[in-house]
Image (cartoon, helix red, strand yellow):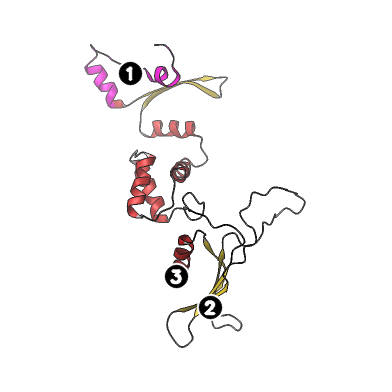
Amino acid sequence: RDDVLQWARTVAHENGFVAVIMRSDTETGSRGRSSFVLIGCERSGTYKCRNKEFVRKDTGSRKCGCPFRLRGKPVRGGEGWMVKLICGIHNHELAKSLVGHPYAGRLTKEEKKIIADMTKSMVKPKNILLTLKEHNADSYTTIKQIYNARSAYRSSIRGADTEMQHLMKLLERHQYIHWHRLKDEVVVRDLFWCHPDAVKLCNACHLVFFIDSTYKTNRYRLPL
């Protein structure tokens, strides 16, 4: 079954569309159940709104009722699967390229793990994308999907906390020396933190003290 799906998806990508599972079942010995997989185009079917009272004129859905169908089932008395073409036409134009396609370019578990590890190592998104392309030359992933995966990974670490709340927890956890000032008791107006070892160096070498404070000058074009 997995080989059939892989073959169907590979051929679909070569022809400019994405193949998806529409229905499938596995034979368990119960009456009326048999192993099969029905494969169709991702644009098959129509958009269905769960809220019946909600009326939406422009759904933005990719579904357009494409009739393309393939059916695969195990060969009786033998090994392997047999694939039958039920309908081989599409009612839409085929894509010239699937780069950036939301389904074809989605990340695998292994790719998400690579992105998480490289994000922790402060690797730039463009270099992460190059690494994924080296692992899989046929990948349709784009830089936007890398940014989305990085954001999802960081959100999973923070949990329900905001970025500022997560930062304050990290400062407390790693025993950083920090100070902050609030505005209206809810908004952080100023924040300072320093590594404990940096404080020791400051106390030992206090005759010369240099601080690089040009961030706002470069970022926001403020005067020194």
Closer to us: 29 or 47: 47
Q: Dot 3 corresponds to which residue?
A: 2
Q: Where is residue 200 in the image (x, y as percent from the top left)?
A: 26, 22
Neighbours of disc 3 within 10 Å: few (<14), some (14-19), many (20+) = few
- The residue indicated by pointer 1 is 212
Q: In this view, does 147 lie above or below 28?
A: above
Q: What stretch is highlighted in magenta?
A: 197-224
Q: Taking 61 as reference, is 11 left or right? A: left
The reply to whether callout 2 and callout 1 are in contact (CB within 8 Å) is: no
Amino acid type of disc 2?
Ser
Where in the figure is residue 25, as x and y percent of width and height?
55, 74
Above or below 23: residue 64: above
Whichever of callouts 1 and 3 sits on the residue coming sooner in the sequence is 3
Q: Which residue is drawn at 49% across and 86% down?
A: 76
Q: Mark 2 points at which residue?
A: 35
Is residue 202 one of those drawn in magenta? Answer: yes
Question: Of helix, strand and loop, which one carries label 1?
Answer: loop
Q: Is mark 3 on a helix, strand or loop?
A: helix
**In the rendered view, does 129 fall on the left or right side of 70?**
left
The image position of residue 81, as x and y in percent, is 46, 78
* Other residues around mark 2 within 10 Å, as few (<14) / some (14–19) / many (≥20): few
Structural distance between the alpha carbons of marks 2 and 1: 67 Å
Please tell me which of labels 3 and 2 falls first in the chain.
Answer: 3
Dividing the image into 4 quarters, which one contains the C terminus? top left
